[in-house]
Amino acid sequence: DFVTNASHELRTPISVLLGCVQTLQGPARGDPEAQVEFIDMMEGQATRMARLVDDLLSLSRIELYEHVAPSDNVDLPQIVKEVVSALDQKAQGRGIRIEVNFAEDLPNVPGDKDDIYRALQNLLENALKYGAENSTVTTTIEIAAEDQLGQLPRDLRYVAMSVRDQGDGIAPEHLPRLTERFYRVDDDRSRELGGTGLGLAIVKHMVNRHRGVLLVDSVMGEGSSFTIVLPARIEPSVMRIPGSAADTGR
Ligand code: ADP
């Protein structure tokens, strides 16, 4: 299924590119105005193919090392600041304000900086694509609440990093399928906005690698919220040693 879908996704821009080349060789030869138009179209299709190949490569790379949990600490607020600044222009283009809230005294989180950067970038790009014009997108990092933990083991602390938009929202029947490769709620809209349908699949694999969970909440007409819950590092000073005072409560 995956190979069929990926081939189909690549075939469309290839057909358009070939059509443009044939037009430039034939009817548009000697027509400078038409040439500009077709070359612009070719640039758009080539960019789309490049994005698709980049996402396919990211997906296959993350699948390769998904079983290797990262061990270095990551500075989540710093990553958020970097991603927000990289997407600032895109946000301004739609009149969207990105608000950032960080809780104080966040515990250390073991993670892979590139993975977390990429996951957050995908979520923020979606919020900017699917959020309403002139609205606000909010990125928050805080200690995860009990009701965000799902099946995660309760003997660890968790940090929740969320991206909330004020868009049209997503109907409940789509929510369980959003992280499937190439699953889109609205095919035409996703393509029009330059989407590959792979962004959330990549996020899910990255979150799995970090032994966390991805939560999606959405209210139609109000907006959507995507939250990455990641386990915090157990610091030696709070580690429980069987039989110790900390363990027995003495
Ligand atoms: P795409 O490249 O199409 O955006 P994603 O994997 O990132 O692919 O997302 C899958 C689908 O989920 C999108 O096509 C869109 O229909 C829906 N979606 C993702 N994020 C949002 C959001 N913030 N608001 C509304 N719909 C969203």
Image (cartoon, grey):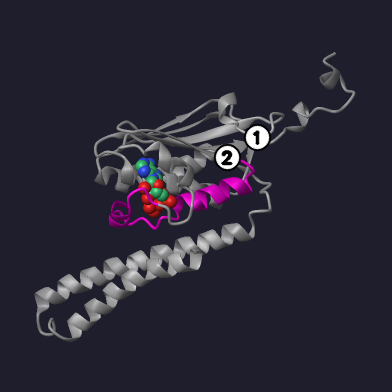
Left or right of 62 in this view: 125: left
| Quarter of image, res 211 | top right
- The residue under label 1 is which amino acid type? Leu
Mark 1 lies within 8 Å of ligand 1 (Cβ measured): no
| Residue 197 percent coordinates (x, y) | 41, 55
Disc 2 target residue: 213
Left or right of 25 in this view: 55: right
Q: Nearer the viewer, residue 72 or 201?
A: 201
Under circle 1, the secondary element is loop
Badge 2, how many Cα within 10 Å: few under 14, some, many 20+? many
Q: Which residues are magenta?
A: 184-213
| Residue 86 percent coordinates (x, y) | 39, 48
In whole angstroms, how far apart are the C-alphas of marks 2 and 1?
Answer: 8 Å
Q: Residue 152, which numbered label?
A: 1
95 over 247 or under it: above or below: below
Decide: marks 2, 1 in contact (CB < 8 A)?
A: yes
Under circle 2, the secondary element is strand
Q: Residue furthest top?
A: 250
Q: Which residue sits at x=22%, y=77%?
A: 20
Q: Which residue sits at x=47%, y=56%?
A: 181
198 in the magenta segment: yes
